[in-house]
Image: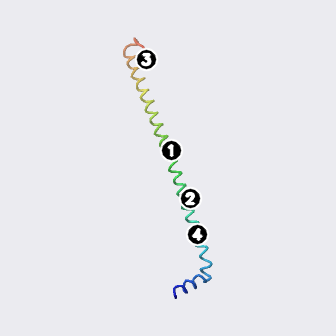
Amino acid sequence: MPVHENLQQIHEHQIYKTVAPLVSIALVGCVTWLLTMILDLENKALSNEQKIIHYQQDAEDAWEEIEDLRRTVIDLRIYLGNGYRSSPHD
């Protein structure tokens, strides 16, 4: 069983006893940091998606207002073109 003896010697070595916990802590820290970054990016993506939806709704409202203004301008042109004979809202 030379493999078992080699592993036992590595496990009992002072450098391994010092470095192994540090490597474990570093690994846990890196994984925690990665998960935190992923969650933060997910929250930012959700926030951006909500902003896009809000901007799209604002744009649709603006187009509706532009269409209403266009109709009003057309009504005014007709009213002025008729020489003030009829009401612009008839």
Question: What is the CA distance from the residue labelled 3 to the residue labelled 4?
Answer: 75 Å
The residue where tag 4 is placed is: 26
The residue where tag 1 is placed is: 50
Alpha-carbon neighbours of circle 4 within 10 Å: few (<14), some, or many (≥20)? few
Q: Is residue 61 above or below residue 52?
A: above
- Of residues 6 and 33, the one nearer the viewer is 6
Question: What is the CA distance from the residue labelled 2 to the residue labelled 3?
Answer: 60 Å
Q: Nearer the viewer, mark 3 or mark 4?
A: 4
- Which numbered disc covers residue 89? 3
Mark 2 and mark 3 residues within 8 Å of each other at the beta carbon: no
Which quadrant of the figure has residue 72?
A: top left
- N-terminal label among 2 and 3: 2
- N-terminal label among 2 and 4: 4
- N-terminal label among 1 and 2: 2
Q: Residue at x 54, y 60 (%)?
A: 35
Mark 1 and mark 2 residues within 8 Å of each other at the beta carbon: no
- N-terminal label among 4 and 1: 4
- Which numbered disc covers residue 36? 2
Q: How is the image coloured?
A: rainbow
- N-terminal label among 3 and 4: 4
Q: Residue at x 43, y 30 (%)?
A: 66
